[in-house]
Image (spheres, helix red, strand yellow):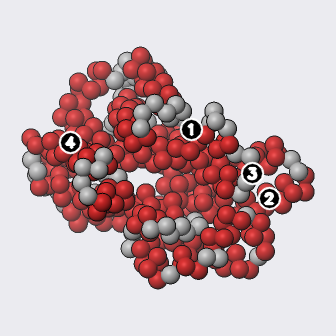
């Protein structure tokens, strides 16, 4: 971390890239499964891994956000004795909103036009049936997505091709609204207790200690993963030397990777408990990954760049799947070769997604990032 210029943690972009591609892999296999093609969902050896891989990738994003945002807010409060809410929210707006609304327009306008204009898209029955279902494109659904409540829409069963993955962006936005208020209001002495209380409250809700209204809220906004990350952000802010000392061990790094590998492939506990355990191990991995003194830490300039554009990778990949799956269906029908089909899908979808994300980041998102960094910096 170079504290002289700005706060930057090495290793986090690599984790973002891995999380984004985990989601892509999950969605590819889910698409194949829904369209009755051979899928990793069909094998008892891979079904658990692939079924939960997407959510695990999203949970890693959530824990990472909780860690980073909390650390930055605490650093700002320590430096300036206050949180500049206006600048914080404007930074989030300039980073999140432009791409979000591009995806919104693609999903609600471009995709329906394409489906109704080209018979090619009827080859993919799972996507086609969703797009032609006009009930999912009602005014209420449009407003929920437009107002950054896609998680609410998805909870109500409103699946919009190209946009439903944005449910997690909705959760992040709701987290960004609430967390600065919490960090600003509570003193450093008790803020860790507050984060812990939030975590315990959500756990209790999920174990049905409260009524169904709270259960619904907890299902829509799974803040427990942000709370896990926030505890890490707080303790790293207060005890970075201690944490750095004990996370530079090769053994701890290897143990964290082995534990993650085990828990994402083998069901041991009830799913919710296993997800929480993974959340804490993800936090440990984050703390290890930012430690420049750990000799085994994964650093790669290509993965770092992919992590830098991972927001685009995450948001554009369903649209790319919508475009490419019908084409490869035609190829499969012609050659009757499932092996060639899978090679094409696993090369074509990530490659085109990265290309579109690169174009989007370079020519659209970067313009807003420059405004964010030049006008609304606080550290």
Which residue position is annotated with label 4? 196
Residue mark closest to the camera, 2 vs 3: 3
Task: Name the residue beneath numbered marker 2.
Answer: 329
Q: Earlier in the sequence, mark 1 or mark 4?
A: 1
Q: Which residue is mark 1?
A: 49
Q: Of tags 3 and 4, which is closer to the observer?
A: 3
Question: Which residue does the image show at 53% across and 43% down from the upper left?
Answer: 53
User: What residue is rendered at 68% in x and 70% in y?
Assistant: 128
Whether 154 is drawn above or below 14: the answer is: below
The image quadrant where one finds the N terminus is: top left
Can residue 86 be seen from the camera position used here?
A: yes
> Relative to residue 208, is residue 170 depicted above or below?
below
Could you tell me residue 350's position as x and y percent? Answer: 65, 50
Marker disc for residue 338: none
Q: Which residue is mark 3?
A: 37
Is label 4 in a helix, a strand or a loop? helix
The quadrant in which residue 173 appears is: bottom left
Q: Earlier in the sequence, mark 2 or mark 1?
A: 1
Label 2 Cα neighbours within 10 Å, binned few <14 / some 14-19 / many ≥20: some
Q: Tell me where residue 300 appears, x and y as whole percent.
A: 53, 34
3D distance between C-alphas at marks 2 and 1: 25 Å
Q: Residue at left 76%, top 63%?
A: 326
Answer with left or right where residue 363 lies relative to residue 120.
left
For label 1, the SS is helix
């Amino acid at each position: 971390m170079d504290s002289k210029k700005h706060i930057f943690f090495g290793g986090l972009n690599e984790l973002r890239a891995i999380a984004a591609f985990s989601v892509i892999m999950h969605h590819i296999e889910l698409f194949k499964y829904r369209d009755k093609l051979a899928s990793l969902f069909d094998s008892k050896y891979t079904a658990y891994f692939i079924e939960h891989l997407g959510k695990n990738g999203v949970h890693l994003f959530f824990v990472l956000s909780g860690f980073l945002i909390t650390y930055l807010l605490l650093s700002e409060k320590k430096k300036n004795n206050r949180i500049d809410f206006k600048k914080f929210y404007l930074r989030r707006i300039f980073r999140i909103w432009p791409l979000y609304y591009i995806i919104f327009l693609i999903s609600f306008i471009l995709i329906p036009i394409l489906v109704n204009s080209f018979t090619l898209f009827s080859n993919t029955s799972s996507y086609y049936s969703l797009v032609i279902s006009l009930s999912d494109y009602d005014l209420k659904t449009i407003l929920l997505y437009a107002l950054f409540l896609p998680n609410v829409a998805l909870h109500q069963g409103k699946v919009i091709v190209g946009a439903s993955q944005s449910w997690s962006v909705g959760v992040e936005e709701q987290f960004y609204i609430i967390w600065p208020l919490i960090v600003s209001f509570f003193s450093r002495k008790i803020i860790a207790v507050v984060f812990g209380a939030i975590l315990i409250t959500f756990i209790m809700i999920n174990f049905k200690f409260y009524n169904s209204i709270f259960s619904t809220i907890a299902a829509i906004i799974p803040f427990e993963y942000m709370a896990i990350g926030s505890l890490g952000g707080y303790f790293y802010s207060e005890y970075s030397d201690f944490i750095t000392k004990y996370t530079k061990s090769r053994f701890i790094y290897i143990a964290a990777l082995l534990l993650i590998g085990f828990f994402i492939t083998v069901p041991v506990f009830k799913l919710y408990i296993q997800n929480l355990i993974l959340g804490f191990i993800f936090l440990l991995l984050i703390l290890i990954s930012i430690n420049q003194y750990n000799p085994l830490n994964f650093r790669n300039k290509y993965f770092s760049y992919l992590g830098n554009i991972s927001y685009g990778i995450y948001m554009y990949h369903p649209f790319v799947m919508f475009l490419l799956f019908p084409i490869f269906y035609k190829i499969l029908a012609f050659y009757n070769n499932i092996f060639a089909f899978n090679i094409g899908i696993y090369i074509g979808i990530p490659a085109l997604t990265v290309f579109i994300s690169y174009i989007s980041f370079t020519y659209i998102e970067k313009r807003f990032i420059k405004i964010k960094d030049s006008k609304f910096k606080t550290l």
